[in-house]
Amino acid sequence: MRKYWTVFQVNWQNALQYRGPTFISILGNLLHISVLLYLWNAIYLSNQSLGSYTLSDLITYYILQLIINSMVLSYISWEISDQISEGSFSNFLVKPVNYLHYWFTINLSGKLFEGLIILVVGAILSFLLIAHVSFPSSGLSLVYFIFSMILGGLLAFEFDFAIGILAFWIVKVNSFKYMLQYCIFFLAGALLPLDLFPVSFQVVANALPFRFLVFFPIQIFLEKEANPLPGFLIAMGWIVFLYFFLQFALRRGITRYEAVGK
């Protein structure tokens, strides 16, 4: 564990040193959420409604989505695919680290750093919109929400790692990676609550694990998920399955790796 702790510390120091990209990313997400909040406010002013969601519910939904986007969703696939396609992955073949565990440590330190910043931003937004923010009525819902975010973070990392190592099999992976990431983003409920879509779409979305990244945690916070325990078990099952699958896929990918670079 000592080597991974060292990796964690080094990446944390890098995040402190190069904080500009983090602030720019948060600013972009904040602008995106602000536009959505303005849109929904205009819809509700014209006496329209969306399913079972009040204006307060939707404002809360998108503030939480802003937080989850920074603390849960992972974007390490870009660096992983670059290392594989450029040939620098060769360095890891002689290092005493597990590549999956290495990137989990990198992702964890980055998310903790970004999370500290986004929590401050979320708190300021909540204060400014306090009259329109819904809070859980019990402490247990808040505990469930935090636990669901942890599970969502593990799943998000595994999905993004899987996208990254596609570079072992696909030479020009970037365009394919864009498509996969947007599909996951959409099916996670990051653009719109999943229960506002047609029933047939909801059936498909509920059968897939992506809802545990965004939609499921927010439903718990809004207390629209009556019993989250079965969802926790399903999410943990996916986490365990994907962990062993990724270890297998990584070993298979290494056998195809040519280390020729671009």
Image (cartoon, rainbow, N blue to C red):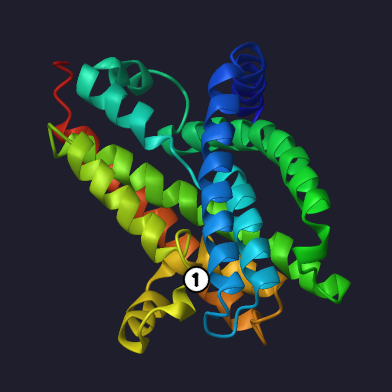
**The furthest residue to the top:** 17
Residue under the image location 56 percent in, 52 percent down: 153
Q: Identify the image quadrant of the N terminus.
A: top right
- In the image: residue 106, left or right of residue 199: right
For label 1, count other residues whose C-alpha is less than 10 Å away and answer few (under 14), some (14-19) or many (20+): many
In terms of image quadrants, where is residue 256? top left
Q: Which residue is mark 1?
A: 193
- In the image: residue 144, left or right of residue 179: right
Q: Identify the image quadrant of the C terminus.
A: top left
Residue nearest the observer in this picture, 12 or 133: 133
The kind of secondary structure element at disc 1 is loop
Up-down relation of residue 257 to residue 211 (above or below): above
Residue nearest the observer in this picture, 251 or 189: 189
Up-down relation of residue 242 to residue 17 (above or below): below
- In the image: residue 100, left or right of residue 78: right
Q: Amino acid at mark 1?
A: Pro
Residue under the image location 55 percent in, 40 percent down: 31
- One can see residue 236 in this view: no
* Residue 93 screen position, x and y as percent: 33, 22
Up-down relation of residue 240 to residue 260 (above or below): below
Residue nearest the observer in this picture, 102 or 94: 102
In terms of image quadrants, where is residue 208? bottom left
Residue nearest the observer in this picture, 102 or 38: 38
Residue under the image location 59 percent in, 41 percent down: 30
Residue under the image location 12 percent in, 32 percent down: 171
* Residue 260 screen position, x and y as percent: 13, 16
